[in-house]
Amino acid sequence: MRRDRKFGHDSGVSEILGVTMLLAMVVAIMSAVVVFLQPFVIDLNDNRAWAAGGVTAEQMNDRILVVAGMPNGTGLVHQTGIPGGSIDVLFNIESWTIGADIYGNDRVEVFRNGSGIVVSSDNRTAETIEIWTDGQQAGFWNNEVWITQWPMTEWKTVVDDPLSYASTFRVDVLDRNGTPIHRWMEINIDGLRLSSPLAEGTFVIDLSNGAIIEKLPNKNLAIEEFPRLSHRKTIDGGHVVRFVLLDIDVDNAATNLNRDLDLTSRGSEMLFDVENARNLVLGMDIGGDSTVEPRYIDHWTSEHEIRIATGDLEGYTGFGPKGPLSGADGLTFHSNPANFQLEILLQKVEVVP
């Protein structure tokens, strides 16, 4: 009887040990599977976030461009959302300077010198200067008289009055007949940034001036869409340079844009509409990643670089650097004849969560 009881006890212990060992093996195998598959799961989640972020950015940019072309005060609702991500405002992410001779034969140059504006006239046909800030004509007090024209006292004149602006700054140079012969403008551009969290950082997409700029962690920047600068040849052999700028207007108090958004057109402003422009100078100051600006320049001047390399610039029509080949002094437009039609349009879209 004692032997039987001992045998039964040993048998029960063996069954418990067997089950325990089996469970341990199952847990070990499952742990190994989890460890083995974890990188693949992380990559899968990152790929989903990357794809979702890219699609969301493309759809939003398309909607914004559609609204930008609508009449003032009209728009649509864009249903958006980035799970676990965010949408933020990029204030003054871009600043563009555009100057061109628009009448006569003089070569006029306008540029900033610190806080002042320098205006020079090669042929000395410039007589006065008018300045407009955000659409309002600027001026200064002189013996209790409000003056809206600065005189060109010398062939090179400096205007150093304190003049602030938010969006647009315009300088018109006039001849003795009061005809504008040169226009120079600064335009500040706001944009949007979409952010999606990934395992090793954040996937960032900037929507700026019609462009789509993507940056993955530890990867080179990718520009999916460029600003809308173009040129074309007309049926009569002339040329048209067209640049459509896009500014996003978001209330400073808005804190959560990662939701449905009201997109409303705030109209368009024709900054340049000139039949016979010359000596175009197009400058840019792009915030964010330092590689964006040279990528823009390369995109618009690639054919010019090829012509330079082959030593054949004769008959070239298109954009090229003004001064250094790096484009540090801005871009210009090469054409024959030298005069061309210039169209610069500023579109504004208001974004309200």
Image (spheres, rainbow, N blue to C red):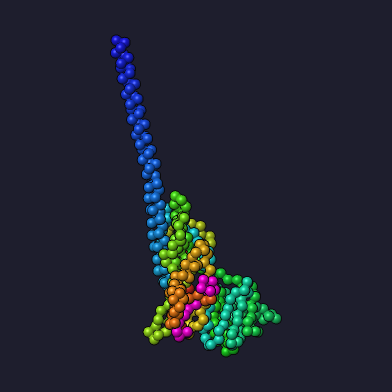
| 5 w.r.t. 27: above or below | above
Q: Which of 170 and 264 is in front in this view?
A: 170
Which image quarter is the N terminus in?
Answer: top left
| 67 w.r.t. 253: above or below | below
- The answer to whether residue 248 of the structure is visible from this angle is no
- The answer to whether residue 83 of the structure is visible from this angle is yes
Q: Give the quadrant of residue 303.
A: bottom left
Q: Is 20 one of the magenta-colored residues?
A: no
The residue sitting at 38% across, 53% down in the picture is 48
Q: How many marks?
A: 0
Q: Position of residue 252 (x, y in %)?
A: 53, 62
Q: Where is residue 49 in the image (x, y as percent from the top left)?
A: 40, 54
Q: Give the quadrant of residue 143.
A: bottom right
Q: Residue furthest front?
A: 310
Q: Nearer the viewer, residue 298 or 312?
A: 312
Please name the predominant secondary structure of the magenta segment in the image: loop
- Boundaries of the magenta span: 324-339
Q: Residue furthest right?
A: 143
Q: Is 335 one of the magenta-colored residues?
A: yes
Q: Which residue lies furthest to the bottom in this view?
A: 177
The residue sitting at 32% across, 14% down in the picture is 6
Q: Which of 125 and 266 is in front in this view?
A: 125
Q: Is residue 142 left or right of residue 21?
A: right
Q: Position of residue 153 (x, y in %)?
A: 65, 84
Q: Where is residue 271 in the image (x, y as percent from the top left)?
A: 50, 77
The residue sitting at 44% across, 50% down in the picture is 199
Q: Nearer the viewer, residue 326 or 337?
A: 326
